[in-house]
Image (tube, rainbow, N blue to C red):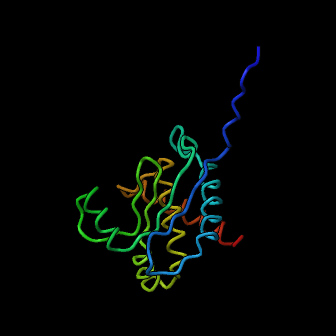
Amino acid sequence: MNRLRSSPAPPFPLIHVFNSQRALRIDVALLAVFAQEALRTCCRIPGRVGGLRAFQELSTVLVSDRRMAELHWRFLRVRGPTDVLTFEHGEIVISTETARRNAARFHTSADHEIRLYLIHGLLHLHGFDDRTAAPARVMEKAQTRILVTLSKSH
């Protein structure tokens, strides 16, 4: 009797990066490499049961402020764009125009802000919460540590 073997699940999910905006030039390939490394790093942090490893694939979509404002209103009933939205099915949506504005405000770069938002979204999918002060501080500390660690290798 021949038995079909299923291949073992990869130790980490895959993450895809899609650029759906034209306001900011993005090196999607480089961001995808960063996203995969950020995902692996987040997976090593204790999170909710399953956390990121419950996903086979995740996606990050870069959008304009206009598209982000539409999504923000549609799903949260909040007017105007936001920096990042995270959806339970494994999608992280990032506004590049908001990233550019925040980069000027915080004296960073748009690339830095986009990477920060990506990590923030991954941590949400891993079970982190920032709706109240104490968990928000834990989440902020984790995302800063991950960003600093990965920035040293990039």
Query: Relative to the observer, which residue lies in front, 67 or 137?
Result: 67
Q: Position of residue 88 (x, y in %)?
A: 42, 47
Name the residue rendered at 72%, 70% in the picture: 153
Q: Position of residue 71 (x, y in %)?
A: 31, 62
Q: Position of residue 104 (x, y in %)?
A: 45, 86
| Left or right placement of residue 74 versus residue 33 in this view | left
Q: Is residue 90 above or below residue 109?
A: above
Q: Position of residue 76 (x, y in %)?
A: 27, 57
Q: Is residue 121 above or below residue 20?
A: above
Question: Residue 35 occupies which quadrant of the picture?
Answer: bottom right
Give the residue at the far top of this rendering: 1
Name the residue rendered at 41%, 78% in the picture: 97
Name the residue rendered at 59%, 75% in the picture: 27
Question: Residue 101 occupies which quadrant of the picture?
Answer: bottom left
Query: Relative to the observer, which residue lies in front, 68 or 123?
Result: 68
| Left or right placement of residue 30 versus residue 143 in this view | right
Quadrant containing the N terminus is top right
Query: What is the count of numbered marks?
Result: 0
Give the residue at the far right of this rendering: 1
Question: Residue 34 occupies which quadrant of the picture?
Answer: bottom right
Q: Is residue 16 above or below residue 103?
A: above
| Left or right placement of residue 63 versus residue 1 in this view | left
Query: Relative to the observer, which residue lies in front, 133 or 130?
Result: 130
Name the residue rendered at 40%, 69% in the picture: 83
Query: Relative to the observer, which residue lies in front, 107 or 53?
Result: 53
Quadrant containing the C terminus is bottom right
